[in-house]
Amino acid sequence: MSLFFKKTKKLESEMDEYLDLVIKGGLIFKLGIKCYMDGQIEEFEHHLRDLRKMEDRADDLRRNIEIKLYTRTLIPEARGDVLGLLESCDKVLNITTETLLEFSVEIPEILPELKQDFLYISDNSISCLENTVSGIRAYFKNIDAVRDYVTKVQFYKKETNKIAERIKRMVFRSDLELSRKIHIRYFTFHVERIAEQSEDVCDRLSIAIVKRFE
């Protein structure tokens, strides 16, 4: 993060560690969803526990970074943008954890013919998260690369929307009880939210870049 943190190596290290945790959280989410779809509930719960611990660690790191940014008047010219990026990125990780928790609590019955689509939508949502993190890193290190990552997030977000629509069309044209249809739609919506929030972060990132060049 050399563009901003030339004199604050500790803060740079913490930012990198925080973003590493967000990436790892997304990978654990994908493993958790795969285990759930495969009926490996014990392994699924193990991944959920790991994800919750990771989110706690990420929250602690984020608060520590925010305090330093506020109290030590670091990078004052971009402090508001950096704080906004941190908080909106944290929301992506929160949604990721909440979604896996909802699977554990409500135990939705996913039709066998929909399980592959749930894996696809999870993969695409987490690709949004991963490219969002890469975009944030690029904001600090190589601003010219940010646009590429934002474009990737927009691509994967549209793919996520397409898969979500396909799932909902299949479900609401089936003979399932309405309550089960709504339940599956609810979980589709939750996974889709990871991509939606990632795109929100990228919108904020794009604005931050424009301000850097003003």
Image (cartoon, grey):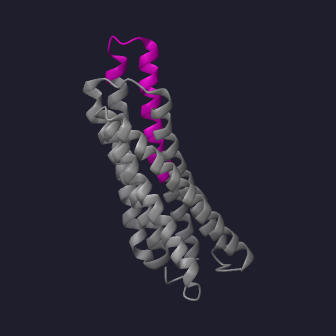
Image side of residue 18 versus residue 181, left or right: right
Picture layout, residue 28 above or below residue 63: above
Most frequent secondary structure within the magenta stretch: helix
Evaluate whether residue 154 shows in this view: no
Q: In the displayed image of the protein, which residue is found farthest to the right?
A: 71
Please report the residue visible at 42 percent of the width from the left and 17 percent of the height from the top.
180
| Front position in the image: 7 or 4 | 7
Q: Quadrant of the C terminus?
A: bottom right
In magenta stretch: residue 192: yes
Please report the residue visible at 70 percent of the width from the left and 70 percent of the height from the top.
67
Picture layout, residue 174 above or below residue 27: above
Image side of residue 81 versus residue 113, left or right: right
User: What x and y, as percent, mark residue 103?
Assistant: 45, 33
User: What x and y, as percent, mark residue 162?
Assistant: 34, 37
Image side of residue 4 versus residue 185, left or right: right
Q: Quadrant of residue 74?
A: bottom right
Please report the residue visible at 46 percent of the width from the left and 15 percent of the height from the top.
179
Evaluate whether residue 60 shows in this view: yes
Picture layout, residue 86 above or below residue 122: below
Q: Which residues are magenta?
A: 170-198
User: What x and y, as percent, mark residue 88?
Assistant: 57, 56
Q: In the displayed image of the protein, which residue is found farthest to the bottom?
A: 7
Please report the residue visible at 50 percent of the width from the left and 56 percent of the height from the top.
54
| Front position in the image: 107 or 179 | 107
Q: How many circles with numbers are drawn on the protein? A: 0
User: What x and y, as percent, mark residue 41?
Assistant: 36, 34
In magenta stretch: residue 189: yes
